[in-house]
Image (cartoon, rainbow, N blue to C red):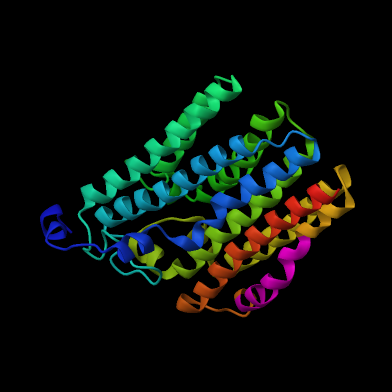
Amino acid sequence: MSDRSAETAGATFADWLEGARPRTWPAALSPVLAGSGVAWFYAGFNLGMALLCLVVAFALQVGVNYANDYSDGIRGTDAERIGPMRLVGSGAAAPRTVKAAAFACFGVAGLAGLALTIWSGHWWFLAVGAACIVAAWFYTGGRRPYGYLGLGEVFVFVFFGLVAVGGTTFVQLGEWTVASLWVACAIGFLACAILVANNLRDLAGDAESGKRTLATRLGDSGTRAFYAGLLIATAVAVVGAAMTTSVWALLGLLFVPPLVPALLRVMRGATGRSLIAVLKATGIAELICAAGLFAGFVIG
């Protein structure tokens, strides 16, 4: 689709909201909530810093969603998409407008990150922030996007798990903890599960368009087994967090009941639109896990 043809269409507020992919927003809130819980347990919770961490995470999440919309749209891989409407692929918005929206979000994340850096005095946060923005753009952007090489889940685990949770905890405590690592793994695994559910839903279309996600490399059955494995790994990580802090951290396991129907749907071979409910349930489960961990750390 050309810029000219896209410019003739006008995206509504609802279109932009859908393009921001609200079902993925728990992946931004959850690491900040869980990481702040660890800081609370060690008596270092700082509301102002936590809110700035949330701004960074949320702006990066929305920014990467718009960046993916732009990059996939100009490549044509969003021409036939089962999931939410895509701004560029549908012609609702000009590619350059969506690209500008992505970088505006990255700018907001950068400013909030700069404020955190100045407040905490840890200037190496600037390098971490720059790495986050670069990773967000090159997920589907550039000549060789790593999302097309089957590496999306690796980067999601690193940046929406280890970096997001660990950074939230460190900026408040000023030190690393073993508990933070366990929590980062739990949240990172569920963030990966969201992406796996998304890529399983789009498996056929991605394979046809040449988008080599991890799902297209593992195949249908392998991707379903991987999804199940991520949920098991999350439970193990929650138990690990409880063993290093308080038994109350086991409240993080409250994510399990909402995911039982989703897991059954995945393992029974659901495809296409039937997996949209799985994607939604996985996002909610991540938020429940984070909230349970936070509550457990506060009680503990």
Position of residue 39 relative to residue 293, above or below, is above
Point 44% across, 38% down: residue: 109
Point 85% across, 49% down: residue: 242
Where residue 15 appears, as percent x and y from the top left, is: 31, 64
Viewer-closest of 59 and 277: 59
Viewer-closest of 231 and 226: 231
Q: Which residues are magenta?
A: 253-265
Q: Is residue 17 left or right of residue 284?
A: left
Corner quadrant of residue 291:
bottom right
Residue 262 shown in magenta = yes
Point 73% across, 51% down: residue: 294
Where residue 123 appears, as percent x and y from the top left, is: 55, 19
Q: Is residue 16 left or right of residue 108?
A: left
Q: Main secondary structure of the magenta part?
A: helix
Residue 184 visible, this orientation:
no
Q: Is residue 284 left or right of residue 144?
A: right
Where residue 36 appears, as percent x and y from the top left, is: 68, 42
Q: Is residue 166 left or right of residue 217?
A: right
Residue 230 visible, this orientation:
yes
Corner quadrant of residue 194:
bottom right
